[in-house]
Image (cartoon, grey):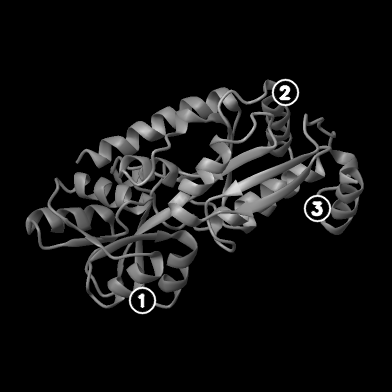
Amino acid sequence: MLKLLKTLLCAALPFVPQAALAQVDYPTESVRIIVPANPGGGTDAAARIFAEYFQRNSDAVTAVVNQAAGGGVVAAQTVGTASPDGATLLFFHAAFHTANLSGNSPFKWDQFTPVATVTESNEVYAVRADTPYDTLDQLIEAAKAKPNTMSIGTQLGGTTQVKAQALNVAAGETMRIVDAGTESDRVAALLGSQVDVISMSVGSAKQYVAAGQMKALAVMNEVPDVTAPEIPTTISQGIDISLPLVQTVYGPKDMDPAAIAAIEALIAQMGEDPEFKALVEKQGQTLALRDAAATAEFLDTEYATMQSYFAN
């Protein structure tokens, strides 16, 4: 029945020509991909692209399950207590680390099996269009010239807190960090002159820049964003901040090596598939493919980076 369901679902999902890709044998007939986010956001979109590709190119039926409750705690518990056979996976990003570091979650990344990274997306530092700052360096110099007068709007306990702290460190800790809520709340606070700078998604920033309401001073990455190459990076401006939001796949502790190997095979195929790359970029993301060993190394570094900013 599951194989029949997969066949019917595959027929309904337009994607890469099946003949162009090798089918990967997976050790379980079905896979639940647990997403600690509500439907409709960037993490959910990335998870669904991954799930669709997984189902198209393996013999397993996939289902995305959204478990946003508890800021990721419920989802982590679901996966952490699941069988290690590969039938239950976690799909999340650096908020997994910040929840742990802020004391909001008992779960740390190394309590799970790192399997792969799939995509990444960027955020920018944005200011109002009527400010005199055209570069991140100008903003930082202004903050240093008048300590404790400039504020950064963020969401405490989330990844934007790290981004705010990173900017504050670059400014010699002369800026005030203000809890301004979700991205929509931060945008309202910025446009209402309640804060001086915020971090926000590239896609949203482009809309406000086009409307003449904001300036996007820098993409927080080493390389330009593919959807907004005109926005300079932090690194290109001499500011050592690189904090892309990397979507990562985890399994329960001691996950079946056969399941890991199968997902690694899918990851390798993704890197050779131009249609998959185009689909990811259409969602405002870029490929960031790593196998299990490289993912573990990346997560160790990512967690340490987050930890260093929480210490400030």
- Relative height, residue 200 to residue 65 (above, below): below
Image spot of residue 299 (x, y percent): 45, 31
Q: Tell me if I can see residue 275 in this picture.
A: no
Q: Which residue is mark 3?
A: 15
The one of 40 and 187 positioned closer to us in this rendering: 40
Quadrant, the C terminus: top left
Determine whether, in the image, residue 104 is placed left or right of residue 285.
Answer: left
Callout 3, which amino acid?
Phe
Q: Residues within 10 Å of mark 1 (few under 14, many from 20)?
A: some
Determine whether, in the image, residue 171 is placed left or right of residue 47.
Answer: left
The image's mark for residue 258 is 2
Image spot of residue 280 (x, y percent): 64, 51
- Report the residue at 30% width, 45% height from top: 102
- Report the residue at 62% width, 39% height from top: 89
Q: Which residue is mark 1?
A: 213
Looking at marks 3 and 1 on the same chain, the residue that comes earlier in the sequence is marked by: 3
